[in-house]
Amino acid sequence: MRLSWARALPLRLWGGCGAPKAARPMCHRSADSGPEPPSDRGPQPTARDEEPGGGPAAFAAALTELERTPGRRLGRLELVAAALAAMPALGVARQLDAYNRLLRLLPRGPWVPRGPLHRLFAPFPRQQECGLQVLEQMERYGVVPDAETRFLLLAIFGPRSRPVRKCQRMLYWLPRMRHANPYPLPAQLPPPGLAAACLGLRRIANDPDARLSVYQQPQPEEGDDEGSTQPYIVGIQSAEQQELLARHGPERPVFVEGPFPLWLRSTRLLYYVLRGDPLPPHLREPPPDPERSLYYPLYLDLDLERGPWDDDEFDVDEVEEGPVFALCMAGDGNQHTLAKWIAGLQQTNPVLGRTPVLFRLGEGDSSAGSPGDGDALRLEGPGAAKLEPPEEAWGRRAQGEG
């Protein structure tokens, strides 16, 4: 007896007897089917037992287990969202195969619109949003989808769905914009420590020929407790900065300021600068003549058309800063550690031995590598200024004059 199409369609969709064998593992098991017969080979070891380590091995073992025993189709969206959140911590956020294996967990066919009228009403919004989250995380970490990713999205969501259109845009733009950054970072950043500090100082320095010097090695040199016994001290200085410091008069002091934050993706570093006061007007070099400069024109005076809604009256706070003589990163930002940096700079800059050095340090409580609010400079202590209401201030002044 043949089943009618109205009864055979649900069986084929939900993995019944008429469904193809390739579609049955993605469907839930029927309640009428009894337990599977025991195997003669005994209990088989799972992938999680074979790879007990963490990281990418644990993520691959979890996906292998889910592919072997898919269970019910309920909760697949929450499963993908939880896997996306755990991928950066497990170190697989930049692996294309991990995203493809994650897309294989989603069912193929039930979320595809059945016709133009069905597609008109934007069906399956939560399911398509799940696919967009996978693609957005791939775009965030610079992972370019391949043909397998596109075929999986076509089978899951249909040819004109939002995930498929976003995948086509990524296939067009990401290969073209991958090398657009003139200052690229390595794919795997080193942990916060001496290596990350050297990378950050190289990124700040404007001169590629600047000299990077390690004034103190961390103790211990590796591991999670790097620099716990003895912090690292590393600095950078170019030949032009060294010449500026040599011309700096010993009668004028120099200042050590910081800490200032620097972000390398999600890694937070703190650096310090050796700065001088702005030069007086009679000691400054005159600006170069535009007609005799090799870099002419230094500026372009373009008479652009402006509309009546354009506001030309805006305030610009022009703050003059002194020259920067050197940069430094240290594992501990106290004055004792930074004094060792100044002592190391005296070997190549003898003028520092006759120049007074003043420390203007902020009391930031956040260490490098952990985001926090301690990177702002705070003026506290007995000598700090205290804000008072205007009435009380004028009253105190009147009593003092009286």
Image (cartoon, helix red, strand yellow):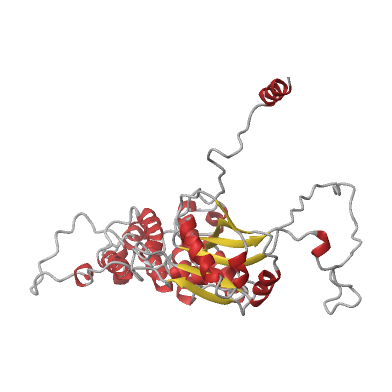
Q: Relative to residue 394, is residue 243 depicted above or below?
A: below
In which quadrant of the rendered image does the N terminus lie? bottom left
Q: Relative to residue 241, is residue 361 depicted above or below?
A: above
| Nearer to us in this view, 305 or 63 | 305
In which quadrant of the rendered image does the C terminus lie? top right
Query: x, y (%) of residue 395?
Result: 69, 21
Can residue 158 be spotted in the picture? no
Can residue 342 be spotted in the picture? yes
Q: Relative to residue 68, is residue 389 depicted above or below?
A: above
Quadrant housing residue 30? bottom left
Query: x, y (%) of residue 222?
Result: 35, 70
Q: How many marks?
A: 0
Quadrant housing residue 278? bottom right
Query: x, y (%) of residue 179?
Result: 59, 76
Residue 14 falls left or right of residue 391: left
| Nearer to us in this view, 230 or 90 | 230
Residue 301 falls left or right of residue 148: right
| Nearer to us in this view, 348 or 124 | 348
Name the residue rendered at 20%, 72% in the picture: 50
Name the residue rendered at 52%, 67% in the picture: 343
Residue 13 falls left or right of residue 377: left
Residue 99 falls left or right of residue 62: right
Query: x, y (%) of residue 105?
Result: 36, 64
